[in-house]
Amino acid sequence: MRSNESRQLVGLDVGSRSVKLIELDRAGSAVELKSIAMAIVEDHGAGPGYQEAIASVIETAGVTTRRVATAVSGPHVAVRGLQFPRLSRKELEGAVWYEGGQVIPFDIREAYVDYSTLPDARGGKSEVLFVAARQPEVDARLELLRSCGLEPRTVTVDAIALMNAILDEPELPETVAVLDIGATTTGFGVARRGALPFIRDIDIAGNTYTQAVMNALGVSYAEAEQAKVVEAARNPAVVCAVENVTRQLVGELSRSLMYYQTRDHGSKAELICVCGGCSQIYGLDEVVSAEVGIPVRRWSALDQVLIDESRFDRSAVNDLAAFVSLAAALARCEDSN
């Protein structure tokens, strides 16, 4: 993010249940919070629900630019690490297109594709981070933002944006993982500085916890949403339901960490940073840490941002930090155009 207004981007996280917006301001090496807002998507996103939520956060935040960075995730997005012999730029482009088409679960001809080559690949080989996203889903997101008067300038992947924000923090260990627990999907990423990340989405997320509590208590969705937070520390039935889902999540996490360790020549994550709205579930970080044997820290891309307490209620911002972590990471993106 630049001080030049033409490069200023607003981070906009369009989730399945809510929309989050962050605008940052850079003065020298310092990054300061300029705007923050969050709105619930009514009617589960049906009809004008997303447009109303986006309009709400724009009005609440009073943003000064319509240029936004956003992110996509889910089954229509694929992130892969590819490795090739040293090739010319033209040869590499053809190789990436061919190999990428073999390793993604949809037709590459119907996808937007991008890739980045690591500057210091090992063993005289080219290491490439390859990203593909199905055009219909990306186009729908762009159309939604434009219909709200916004100018989408950067589209990335949830976990990549979060990993970039984490690896920008010099005091963290060399190899770090992020677990972003949203409503419908949990984004996972792990990377060693200067190496290819491993990125995947896990289907176990906030709604999985809610459904488990619904089944345990025989209550409505809204009641279960409240119970999984309010009663997770005191109601034995809720505690059992939540712990069962957490064990499922830990199983997926353990397999992902093992795969990364095997692929990256024994590199092991030294810290797991947990964020997302459902990261607040009682006892989750302790259980995950105990089961996988790696320290877990609640983290947000907003942690390193300066808060002017004459303009913002710090306690209220802290309460939102986990929810807006992706939006804050996106607000650090630069205009790619």
Image (cartoon, grey):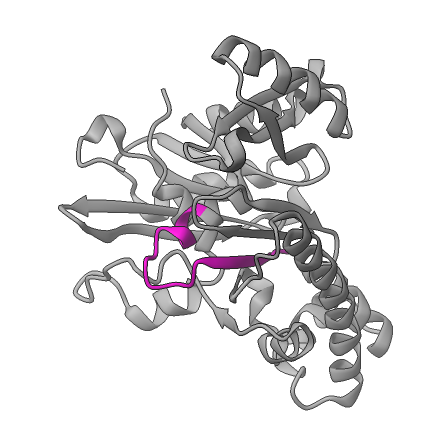
Magenta stretch encompasses residue 174 = yes
The quadrant in which residue 101 appears is: top right
Q: Residue at the spot x=49%, y=28% of the render?
A: 116
Image quadrant for the N terminus?
Answer: top left
Image quadrant for the C terminus?
Answer: top left
Magenta stretch encompasses residue 233 = no
In the displayed structure, does residue 230 sit left or right of residue 335? Answer: right
Most distant residue in the left direction? 28
Q: Residue at the spot x=46%, y=33% of the render?
A: 118
Image spot of residue 45 (x, y percent): 65, 42
Q: What is the tally of numbered marks visible in this picture?
A: 0
In the displayed structure, does residue 119 sit left or right of residue 263? Answer: left
In the displayed structure, does residue 77 sit left or right of residue 36? Answer: right
The quadrant in which residue 172 appears is: bottom left
Image spot of residue 30 (x, y percent): 18, 52
Does residue 221 appear in the picture of this structure?
no
Image spot of residue 312 (x, y percent): 25, 63
Residue bounds of the magenta highlight: 164-183
Image spot of residue 130 (x, y percent): 59, 29
Q: Nearer the viewer, residue 27 or 142?
A: 27
Give the vertical position of 298 relative to 112 (above or below): below
Does residue 132 appear in the picture of this structure?
yes
Give the vertical position of 286 relative to 50 (above or below): below
Q: Residue at the spot x=35%, y=63% of the render?
A: 303
Q: Nearer the viewer, residue 41 or 130?
A: 130
Q: Residue at the spot x=53%, y=16% of the render?
A: 87
In the displayed structure, does residue 93 sit left or right of residue 238? Answer: left
Q: Nearer the viewer, residue 316 or 132?
A: 132
Most distant residue in the top direction? 90
Give the vertical position of 256 relative to 113 (above or below): below
